Amino acid sequence: MNITLKVWRQKNADAPGALVEYNVAGVVPEMSFLEMLDALNERLVAEGQDPVAFDSDCREGICGMCDLVIDGQAHGPDKEATTCQLHMRRYRDGDVVTVEPFRAKAFPIVKDLCVDRSAFDRVQAAGGFVSINTGNAVDGNAILIPHDEAEKAMDAAACIGCGACVAACPNASAMLFVAAKVSQYALLPQGRPEREKRVLAMREAMDQEGFGHCTNEYECEAACPKGIKVSNIARLNREYLRAALTSD
Amino acid sequence: MKLESKVPSGPIEKSWDKHRFDLKLVNPANKRKFKVLVVGTGLAGSSAAASCAELGYQVESFCIQDSPRRAHSIAAQGGINAAKNYPNDGDSVWRLFYDTIKGGDFRAREANVYRLAQVSNAIIDQCVAQGVPFAREYGGTLSNRSFGGAQVSRTFYARGQTGQQLLLGAYSALMRQVGAGAVKLHARSEMLDLVVVDGAARGVITRDLVTGRIERHWGDAVLLCTGGYGNVFYLSTNAGACNVTATWRAHKRGAAFANPCYTQIHPTCVPVAGDHQSKLTLMSESLRNDGRVWVPKKKGDARKPQDIPEDERDYYLERKYPAFGNLVPRDIASRAAKQMADDGRGVGKTGLSVYLDFKDAIARIGLDKVKEKYGNLFDMYRHITDENPYEQPMRIYPAVHYTMGGLWVDYNLMTTIPGLFCLGEANFSDHGANRLGASALMQGLADGYFVLPYTLGGYLAGAKLPKVTADHAAFAQAENDVVMRTRALLGTGGKKAPAAFHRDLGRVMWDNVGMGRNAKGLREALSKIPEIRDAFWKGVSVVGDAADFNQTLERAGRVADFLEFGELLAKDALAREESCGGHFREEHQTPDGEAKRDDEKFAHVAAWEYNGEGKEPTRHVEPLTFDNVHIAQRNYA
Ligand SMILES: Cc1cc2nc3c(=O)[nH]c(=O)nc-3n(C[C@H](O)[C@H](O)[C@H](O)COP(=O)(O)OP(=O)(O)OC[C@H]3O[C@@H](n4cnc5c(N)ncnc54)[C@H](O)[C@@H]3O)c2cc1C
Ligand code: FES
């Protein structure tokens, strides 16, 4: 098939950007969307033109590196899938597809479709951990965790930190990302000693990074490739309230 | 070059304790005077950086991705081994040690493997304490499953995302230290050279991948935790950024490279779909707990799998290896799949795949239980192939997955360059000629949490290092080398993308240095690889600037190194005139097609020394002795 792409090109954070049109011929249904971009880039490089910069690494939906907005949707049209998991069998010959970066004040553009998501790392550094030094642990079975609790914690821990929740949110809020981490630890006994400190610190860091507020749009849940639920945000709010009430 | 393994004397059960006692200590107040550079933030790098920072060292940490959390360890699926014996099925440190030595086809150092088994339990405890949500039983205890090459259930897991959860645990420990100011983080930063001063590793040269700036970083020790080189085959289950650059540059500065020919072809991967393919996706070995591997008995049987009756199916692993069945080690399962395809009984359009069937498991434990155990893997498979594995068997085929070879290290994980340590998949140490499933995660975390933090102190306490900072002449020299090389890559005026050369190399590697190797094919590879390399340096097209975000330049640099390294890999495969583990020389097999070792001539580690551009490298040998396990032909039947 032949696909027409309209791709956001922007030299760096400060330069102006614009959509540029490219035709990609010889696309087959088994190709992934990113392999289609690879094919475009290989051609551009052979022609001596600047290829389209985009991020990816594992190409199997787990590292969280890929991050495209495709026809207005973070990670494209497939539900619970990352950009790298999208395949061209979704498209028909002659389709026109628009490709843009994840946009948010807290994710400045690096080049073309690549953005800087280091704000997430800083939020994590503020409190997304259990303070335990190497070598201090008790036997793994000394901490009993009921099966269903462990599964619930795992549901939250499945977050890949891609930032689709931020890109999809009209306020560019990072609530789902923060909620997933706070929930994982709040659900596990290991996380409880620092529960108040953690939620306060992570929320504050989130605000400082310039992420917006949550106004219950639920766009984050719809865009999340790992199916993280907004119920985690409710838990985050409860944890926050609890911490705010008990802190002195 | 002298290869001193530094393995302590005395009974193996005591060696690590004794060694730890004998190692010199750095006084707590002095630790902050030392700076440690940690390259890589996978399980090995994150755990080492966090642990060293906790001890009080100054740490700087580097990774290619935009966040340390995206290191390739994140992709590990199935699980991590430990000798906890929670299921009460007869496991022990000794058994894990024995299984790992045997699984590695008797080509690993006994003392290292024993230590690995010994610290395995502490890893699980550490990860649990960090809040890693391992799978649990209803009573709240940790769950286990089985992996290949073992008859006990010793694998801990977090659904099909064990690597992700372990890495996020290590990442959280690392970020805690970043937040505390004890670790300085350099993401989107690639190490392009090692700086050696007076024979000791004292720094690295990096490129800031956003601005293109070349930077000098000095330290008192350098840890390479940069992962494996599977991408030398172009197609592999590895992530795009996995490379050999850091270890190869260190090799060219004097670090011996050990057993580069030991590569692992994983039996259960989604088969190749076409020329556009950029990577292959693993379907975790854990699936072989419940999935049954089969092909039709009849050659060229084109019926749908559902239409092939039971008695016309060949469950060949169960037939050939009744004791281990579908859970034989990887090298054996991969070769068996290749034999079926060679025999004309492979399935799918290309005939290059076999079935992995869950029909019986669904009938036995129910759809919900299968979903809970493998849901995300099944989803992944469906995304890629558009086929529903709950209704029809998966199609799988072997693919390059892991590299057992790597920089040679002694018992302290130190390379042949003093002060340069190598951890995780990047070193050669523990898996011999074949790695068992669920033991790479174990090794990466053993190295980073429980081995290096001790051995590093031993080195620094005794090293008497002169003060060296980044204005030393050696830094200027190394930086200049990097700049010249980058300029050369940008200046060929060629017309072919780096990826296209990478594909050319991969084809030669897979065809001639892949699952079946022979002298003729290896010699052919040794003449073709330099041809591709020449063509690359004459005709590669790298657009854009050095002082900019430039992904083509990044790729070109990595491909250039693969083009040198691939030759060494083939050389090593040619020199090893035996079959062992993942290294299968067709000239050396038993009458029923199993690997035939030659213990008399090859019970050793081959460690290559670089002698300069265009010169033959030297093959050094570290003999392996087996005082604790009886060396024998592997038998899984
Ligand atoms: C799909 C898949 C599934 C797997 N499943 C399992 C499993 O279930 N159980 C198991 O035990 N093992 C498994 N493995 C193997 C295991 O995941 C790896 O061997 C292990 O995680 C490697 O960890 P590492 O820390 O050594 O390196 P990696 O995690 O690969 O990390 C390498 C780090 O080095 C950095 N780096 C590399 N080069 C440079 C450079 N030049 N400059 C700066 N930084 C650099 C990278 O950015 C990264 O941070 C699996 C592997 C794959 C591919
Ligand atoms: S590239 Fe890793 S999630 Fe898409």
Image (cartoon, rainbow, N blue to C red):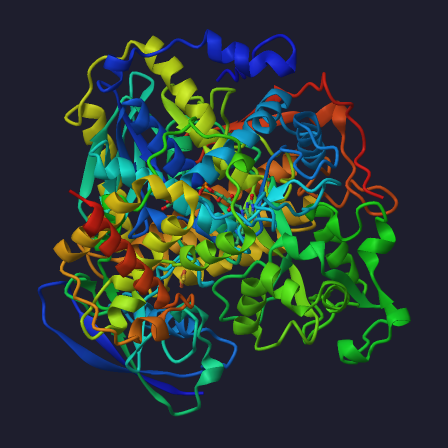
Q: In the picture shown, does residue A65 fall above or below B33?
A: below
Using the rendered image of the protein, determine whether residue B267 is visible from the camera's viewpoint: no
Q: In the picture shown, does residue A43 fall above or below B123?
A: below
Q: In the picture shown, does residue B151 fall above or below B294?
A: above
> Residue A113 location, x and y as percent?
25, 68
Q: In the picture shown, does residue B243 fall above or below B476?
A: below
The answer to whether B629 appears left or right of A100 in the picture is right
Looking at this view, is B251 or A119 the one in front?
A119
The answer to whether B562 appears left or right of B135 in the picture is left
Which residue: 81% across, 33% down? B633
> Residue B6 location, x and y as percent?
52, 14
The answer to whether B27 appears left or right of B244 in the picture is left
Q: Which quarter of the image is occupied by the C terminus of chain B?
A: top right
In the rendered image, the residue lying farthest to the right is B311
Determine the image quadrant of residue B195: top left
> Residue B261 location, x and y as percent?
59, 40
Determine the image quadrant of residue A37: bottom left
Using the rendered image of the protein, determine whether residue B139 is visible from the camera's viewpoint: yes
Looking at this view, is B493 or B343 the one in front?
B343
Where ligand 2 lies, by image quadrant?
A: bottom left
> Residue A172 location, x and y as percent?
20, 68
Which residue: 39% across, 65% down? A228
The answer to whether B15 appears left or right of B602 in the picture is left
Looking at this view, is B382 or B416 the one in front?
B382
Which residue: 54% across, 32% down? B428
